[in-house]
């Protein structure tokens, strides 16, 4: 199936915020609190395109990890997305209270 991103984005832009919130829940498997139309359009379009084209290649992931390691930064673990229809609606990227505040000092010594 060839993905026409321009047409898909046009269709998303014609949707109301309520329809976009429903589409977001369908695509991501969880509800969104956002009511910002442009944000919802971008996020939904990104996810549909990533699902259709496979997202980042394994080579690109390895290179990003190498760059982060060389800089002394830690990357978050890649979340496993639950299969659609599994009923699981958790956000693997959600920050806990202890993660929401930055630590003191530069996380990438020598780069600032």
Image (spheres, helix red, strand yellow):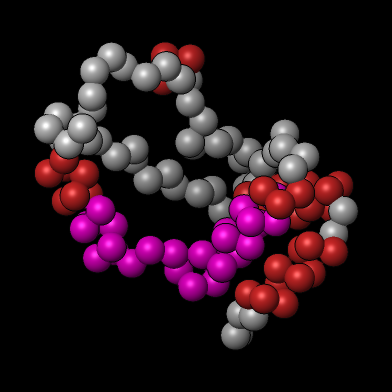
Q: In the picture provided, is 72 more to the left or to the right than 29?
A: left
Q: What residue lies at 50% left-to-right and 49% top-to-bottom?
A: 81
Residue 10's place in the image compared with 102, above or below, is: below
Towards the viewer: 18 or 78:
18
Magenta stretch containing residue 61, yes or no? yes
Q: What residue lies at 64% left-to-right and 80% top-to-bottom?
A: 4
Pick the quarter of the image with the N terminus.
bottom right
- The answer to which image quadrant residue 74 occupies is top left
- Residue 34 visible in the picture: yes
Name the spot of residue 67 as percent of width and height, x first: 19, 50
Q: What residue lies at 28% left-to-right and 63% top-to-bottom?
A: 60
Name the spot of residue 85 as percent of width and height, x first: 67, 52
Name the spot of residue 3 as percent of width and height, x first: 61, 80
Q: In the picture provided, is 20 more to the left or to the right than 50?
A: right
- Magenta-drawn stretch, dominant element (helix, strand or loop): helix
Q: Residue furthest front?
A: 112
Segment colored magenta: 40-64
Name the spot of residue 93 as percent of width and height, x first: 48, 36
Towards the viewer: 93 or 5:
5
- The answer to which image quadrant residue 79 occupies is top left
Q: In the picture provided, is 49 more to the left or to the right than 112?
A: right
- Residue 85 visible in the picture: no
Count of numbered circles on the image: 0
């Amino acid at each position: 199936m060839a993905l026409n991103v321009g047409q898909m984005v046009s269709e998303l832009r014609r949707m109301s915020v309520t329809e976009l919130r429903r589409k977001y829940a369908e695509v991501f498997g969880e509800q969104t609190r956002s009511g910002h139309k442009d944000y919802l359009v971008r996020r939904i379009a990104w996810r549909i395109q990533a699902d259709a084209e496979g997202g980042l290649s394994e080579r690109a992931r390895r290179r990003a990890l190498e760059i982060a390691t060389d800089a002394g930064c830690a990357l978050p673990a890649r979340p496993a997305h639950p299969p659609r229809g599994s009923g699981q609606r958790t956000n693997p990227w959600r920050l806990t209270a202890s993660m929401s505040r930055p630590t003191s000092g530069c996380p990438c010594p020598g780069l600032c």
